Amino acid sequence: MDLTPREIVNELDKYIIGQAEAKKAVAVALRNRYRRSMLTKEQMEEVTPKNIIMKGPTGVGKTEIARRLAKLVKAPFIKVEATKYTEVGYVGRDVESMIRDLVECAVRLVKEERIKQVNEKATKIVDDKMVGYIAEARKADKGETPDNIFRANILEGYKKGYYDNEVIEIEIIDAPKPMELVPGGAEISIGSIFGDMMPKKKKKRKVTVKEASKMLIQEESEKMIDDDAVNSEAIRRAENDGIIFIDEIDKIAGRANKSGADVSREGVQRDILPIVEGCTVMTKYGPIKTDYILFIAAGAFHISKVSDMIPELQGRFPVLVELDSLKKEDFVRILTTPQNAITVQYKTLLSVDNIDLKFTDDAIEEIAEIAEELNLTREDIGARRLHTVMENLLEDISFNAGNIPTMTEVIVDKNFVIDKLGVHNKERDLKKYIL
């Protein structure tokens, strides 16, 4: 998708409030992907992505920016926690597993696309099978003989959904369940080791017509797609379009002690270094080069600093953007502007129980002010503070809903908010000021 940086930022603005610098940095990084794809093969090899470090408190949009970015261009994307990895030689996950996870994500993306392409053809095959299954069930239950007219009537009724809740017995391929060979490691199934050498077992299952249709369409679609072509395309996409978001990188940034729980922190940085610099990692789908994967690291950096990372790793993240703590104005916009605004979510949820929830402008202002105050006097948890505030505010309404027969309007105004939450606005967490 050849979106300009400005168009990318406009798309991100629909979901994330503020943080213009961070949005600008990722938009440029994404556009550079497109620019690189337009170069000759020789030129492409020389251009590597400029990795980004996002520095800022929790809940200000670091992860959401990266996630929305990947969704925007349908790129393989994974989010990993730096604290889950250990230095080679220690028990736990090695850093190469993030590359294997990225390839798994790419395979899933490509497979979904290919399945959509053959869906229509697979549906026609399954329609015929389903008529047979329904006819057999009717014959067993009612002794009806499935002639051509009878089958035509069944097909028409099946397409209109008349039989959706009827239970039938179908035969499907019994795929072996994957086994985890190493705790926290890759899952490998017997089928992936021996491939087509092992005969495919089939098993009978009793399911509804609707479920059977989905299962059989999936099975037929997978028969039609070329797994080797899917795997090679997935490797190509992971190499050239992949985005890895490494969260909590500040937790491994401090200098390691010689003993204790933090002994491998600096070792993890050294292990991440070749991955970010560019190396080849073996996966069950084949080797993958990491040279052109975009890495976005993020952390609060309250205790440690970016400069506490080993110099070589700092050099591989040339773009540093600092995200701002959220102010009252930001909270007001978060509550009203995004397509998935929290007020819209609560309104939609409570409409299920016949409550038409409405927020006045002064209520929104008051909620925003309380959220800012709590973040200043307690831990700064960014926009996540709004979830705490909103749950406390609407607790009684949510609890008493469910017994209302007709749609009832409930207006949340400033007085309602003060009655429920005003006390929080006066509280001060004195521990913050005690040494």
Image (cartoon, rainbow, N blue to C red):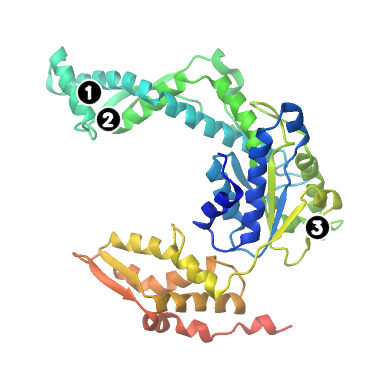
Residue 232 placed where, x, y %?
61, 24
Residue appearing at x 57%, y 64% in the figure: 18
Name the amino acid type tagged 2. Answer: Val
Q: Which mark is residue 222?
A: none
Q: Which residue is mark 3?
A: 260
Looking at marks 2 and 3 on the same chain, the residue that comes earlier in the sequence is marked by 2
Name the amino acid type tagged 1. Answer: Ile
The answer to whether residue 301 is seen in the rendering is: yes
Q: Quadrant of residue 166?
A: top left
Residue appearing at x 79%, y 53% in the figure: 265
Name the amino acid type tagged 3. Answer: Gly
Q: Quadrant of residue 434?
A: bottom right
Badge 1 marks a residue whose secondary structure is helix
Badge 2 marks a residue whose secondary structure is helix
Residue appearing at x 50%, y 82% in the figure: 424
Q: Which mark is residue 209?
A: 2
Circles 2 and 1: CB distance less than 8 Å? yes
Q: Is residue 393 above or below residue 36?
A: below
Q: Which quadrant does the N terminus fall into?
A: top right
The answer to whether residue 100 is seen in the rendering is: no
- Spatial separation of the CA atoms under disc 3 and disc 1: 65 Å
Q: Nearer the viewer, residue 164 or 244?
A: 244
Looking at marks 3 and 1 on the same chain, the residue that comes earlier in the sequence is marked by 1
Residue 323 placed where, x, y %?
65, 63
- Spatial separation of the CA atoms under disc 2 and disc 3: 58 Å
Q: Which mark is residue 134?
A: 1
Residue appearing at x 58%, y 84% in the figure: 428
Residue 291 placed where, x, y %?
74, 36
Badge 3 marks a residue whose secondary structure is loop
Residue 317 placed where, x, y %?
76, 50
